[in-house]
Amino acid sequence: MIIDSNKKYKQFVNSKAQELRSAGKIQSNPSTYFGEIGSIPLEDLKYSDQLNIKLESVKNIFSEILDSNFINNYKIIGSPKQYEYRFRMDYVCSFNPIHKPNNRFGQRKAGKFNWVVDMDESVLFSKDWFKKVREVYQKAIELEIPLYDLVKHTGELRYLVIREDKDNAMLSVVTTNKDNPNINKLLEFAYDLGFKSVILVYQPGISDKVEGEEVKVLGDEFIEVEMANKKFSVGNNTFFQNNVKAFEEIVNFIKPTLAKNEVLIDLYAGIGTLGIIFGDKFKKVYGYELIKENVEFAKINTDLNGINHYEIFQKDLNDKNEIQNLPQNQTLIVDPPRTGLEKNGVTHVLSFNPKQIIYISCNPITQAKDIVSLQESGYKIVEAKAFDLFPHTLHLENVVILEK
């Protein structure tokens, strides 16, 4: 079976995992919540076996794109940490009127969006910070702040979202009611627990979102994170890599492959992470990003790192208007969402006519489809490697480097 869809990918990984389970090749001590929450479907397998399954899946996806020698030498790099590795975790606060306990704090049950598993310990996130987030949840119960009913769409407290790096942590309190006076008491309680930043986020919509209007901030409006010897300010509505140490492995792989070009183009730039990390190698860096808040933080981060040759533009890379051509001596980096570049994104990449393309993807299926289009335009794969940024899950990152 050639994997050409997300459904087939899931079937492939699950079938390989089941083969190992049937052969008795499992761990003896998976966590309490294995089989309950949906974020650790492979946790009962030895980590080396998880890596082998993911590597086999990538080889399958790229089997019709790469020659056999390339496929046989494909490698996957594991995460330095298999537990407590996540930079961010979104914990659901939910009221279930039928089943006990009625008030719940944790993650969704595997395959059931409206069912929250009430958790009293963490799996993939810092256990120490988890305890503090749960204390905030328990304080909300004490203050009689009604939790959100995922079926009826009633109640107020929806999420407690935490971002953490070393001793610094940001807590976002997501609610449907910004005027409840007890919410202020909850924010103050959280701040006194040691969160560097506590932000009240107003999200009254029915759709399941943690982003929203920032109503009030206690402490800083950002959390500062260090990665690859650079510093980054990360805000409530911005994106940052969820496994910092494992992403540094990707950086270490890319750095020696960078061509000696004058210009670096960073598409889907986010808060400027890749352009800033690799910017020292180039005379000029251009970033393109859709979300306004990401663009604003990218400008903050270039100043934070003393970089004055980085220029970022707010642009939707899915629109049809080509970006104005820049000098031809370019390396271009893309790290798009799971949907990939899509048609217009490929058009934008080709409009730059870069000498080198570095394609980082959290979805090798859409990545492979995009690469076929790039190959048809004359680009050849020169390097590729997989990285496991998400131990115990079905997900991975894949990096492919192309040149013309």
Image (tube, rainbow, N blue to C red):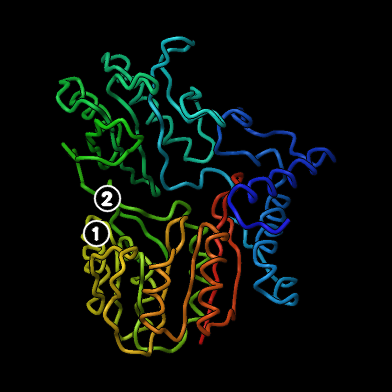
Would residue 179 be found to the left or right of residue 144 on screen?
left
Q: In which quarter of the image is residue 211?
A: top left
Residue pointed to by mark 2: 235
Distance from label 2 to label 1 (Cα)?
Answer: 7 Å
* Residue 386, placed above or below residue 144: below
Would residue 167 be found to the left or right of residue 57 on screen?
left
Give the total number of marks visible in the rendering: 2
Residue at 75% in and 71% down: 72
Q: Are marks 2 and 1 in contact (CB under 8 Å)?
A: yes
Q: Which of 39 and 169 is in front in this view?
A: 39
Residue pointed to by mark 1: 297
Q: Which amino acid does label 1 sit on?
A: Phe
Q: What element carries label 2?
A: loop
Q: Quadrant of residue 59?
A: bottom right
How crowded pointer 2 is (Cα within 10 Å; few <14, some 14-19, many 20+) is rated as many
Residue at 24% in and 62% down: 295
